[in-house]
Amino acid sequence: MARFGKEHRRQMMSLTVVRRTQMSDHMVRVTVGGDALESFSYHGGDQCFRLFFPRPGQTELRMPTFANNGWAAQYFLMPKDVRPYVRNYTVRAFHPESNELDVDFVVHGDGPASVWAQQAEPGSPVGMFDEGRRYRPREDAEWQLLVADGSGLPAALAIAEETPASLPTRLIVEVPTQDDILGTTFGPHISATWLTSPDGDGAMPGERARAAALTMTPPGGPGTVFVAGENSLATGTRRGLVAAGVPKSAISFYGYWKIGRSSPS
């Protein structure tokens, strides 16, 4: 559940695709923009939102109008032939000078979001319901651990890029192939480990990232942890870190998806 400060105002925004960039074999960046982003408040890495995009054959994007929890009831009351797809994503980067926002997609198989991201053309309609930032690093943290698979990568990278140089950070990321290891550069306070999980090797998604996180000895002093990706990666890493002595209150964990389960349409 997102947590909102008094300064945060949830928004339902109509936007359009500005461009599509192939970042790697399995990662596509779709940049969206529009005047509605003039009032968008960016609060930091892991800021999440609902993304609405057309089903095949839909020429217009019909969106809910309620900028509150009532949006879901309004959405599911729409006839399916006019109802858009909706999926959860996080902000990779916000560019206020141009009213643009980057959304990174892991593309695999023939899921609706994967297909749409690979075919999105400039000018295509898209909707966004901003839901705020969830990760709140503890203010007294002396170290930070970020763990993610491909789905959690955009949030983990955004958090790492925004981390002050005074906070030593370990970043552990699992991606499908060597080509998906992005050439992201960090300051010396970020120690990044990239792992691959090619199809057919027998490992479950997120298994390598979880193992790497749990083989490290948590540093002394208070820390802060962000784990995001497949549900077993998130819950398993949290469980192991708690067993190693990390307080539950120091761990933010998010299961973005679950093996064998699709999102409602």
Image: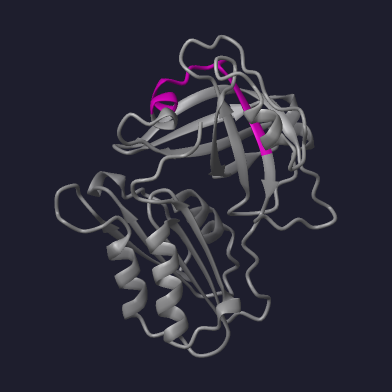
- Residue 193 shown left or right of residue 121 in the figure: left
The question of residue 92 being in magenta is answered with no
Instruction: Pick the residue in front: 229 or 140.
Output: 229
- Residue 195 shown left or right of residue 234 in the figure: left
Residue 187's x, y, as percent? 48, 64
Residue 226's x, y, as percent? 52, 66
Please tell me in which quadrant of the rendered image residue 179 appears.
top left
Residue 75's x, y, as percent? 65, 29
Q: Is residue 97 visible?
A: no
Q: Which residues are magenta?
A: 115-129
User: Which residue does the image show at 39% across and 25% down from the upper left?
Assistant: 115
Residue 70's x, y, as percent? 75, 38
Instruction: Pick the residue in front: 247 or 231.
Output: 231
Q: Is residue 142 visible?
A: yes
- Residue 1 shown left or right of residue 53 in the figure: right
Q: Is residue 67 above or below residue 64?
A: below
Quadrant for the N terminus, please. bottom right
User: Which residue does the image show at 54% across and 53% down from the upper left?
Assistant: 158
Seen as rendered, the residue at the extreme right is 6
Q: Is residue 64 above or below residue 79?
A: below
Q: How is the image coloured?
A: one colour
Q: Is residue 26 above or below residue 214?
A: above
The question of residue 127 being in magenta is answered with yes
- Residue 209 shown left or right of residue 97 in the figure: left
User: Which residue does the image show at 64% across and 22% down from the upper left?
Assistant: 78
